[in-house]
Image (cartoon, grey):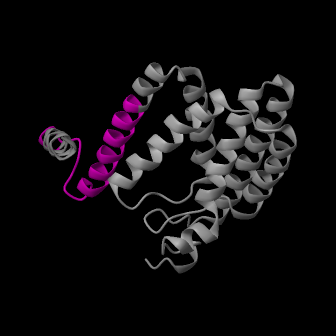
Amino acid sequence: MKNAFVTRSLDYLIKNNACTEKQKNIFRYTLESLYSLVTKTTAVLILSIFLKTFPITCLMLLLYSLLRGFAFGLHATKNLYCWFITLSTYVFIPLFIKYLTIPLEIIYGLFGVGLIAMLLWAPADTPSRPLLSKKKRQTNKIITLFISVIYVLSAFYFNNANYYEIVLFVFMIETICICPITYKLFHVPYNNYKNYKK
């Protein structure tokens, strides 16, 4: 299905002069990403409706996407792994949040861990998307820290158990994705901008 969608879309774009042969790989990557995003998000939202976790899932998707948009981090190396991680994150964690309560003392401690992780490791690039611009890296770090602080303050403001836990898991998932140890475990180079060769 994905290959058919990408191939037909590329053919259409080339035929209508919206994409040149030189741009083909860029458009292919964009179309593959778009297809993955739409299919996974649709599957997650449908499952969340059946499991009655739709509000929690939607909020997790929103908060995590915003933070990851600036902090970046490791990507799954295969589509199957990506499906497994996506379903684990957006189906099972909302169920956990819905039915179990984490003590506030633990949440506060892990908020601190998350903030320190964002300060130390964000943004974390990948071999396919090295962050070559120092200014962009600095800007992304500042925005990441700003978003993280807003999340923590909003958790205190709303003082809602589910919201506390949503923010907590968003921090923990992103911390795992940007942690150098995670990169090492999966044999993926870290700080790729340092080794980039034109």
Q: Quadrant of the N terminus?
A: top left
Residue 185 is left or right of residue 111, and the answer is: left
The stretch drawn in magenta includes residue 30:
yes
Q: Quadrant of residue 35?
A: top left
The residue that appears at 39% across and 39% down in the rendered structure is 37
Count numbered badges in the picture: 0
Residue 135 is left or right of residue 157, and the answer is: left
The residue that appears at 79% across and 52% down in the rendered structure is 115
Q: Position of residue 134 (x, y in %)?
A: 65, 65
Q: Between residues 145 and 162, which one lies in front from this camera angle?
A: 162
Q: Position of residue 178 (x, y in %)?
A: 62, 60
> In the image as oriented, which residue stretches furthest toward the front?
100
Q: Position of residue 60 (x, y in %)?
A: 60, 33
86 in relation to 44, above or below: below
The stretch drawn in magenta includes residue 168:
no
In this rendering, does residue 192 appear at all?
A: no
Magenta segment boundaries in residue numbering: 14-43
The residue that appears at 58% across and 21% down in the rendered structure is 55
Q: Between residues 189 and 85, which one lies in front from this camera angle?
A: 85
Examine the residues drawn in magenta and state their main secondary structure.
helix
Q: Between residues 96 and 178, which one lies in front from this camera angle?
A: 96
113 in relation to 9, above or below: below
Q: Position of residue 176 (x, y in %)?
A: 62, 58
20 in relation to 48, above or below: below
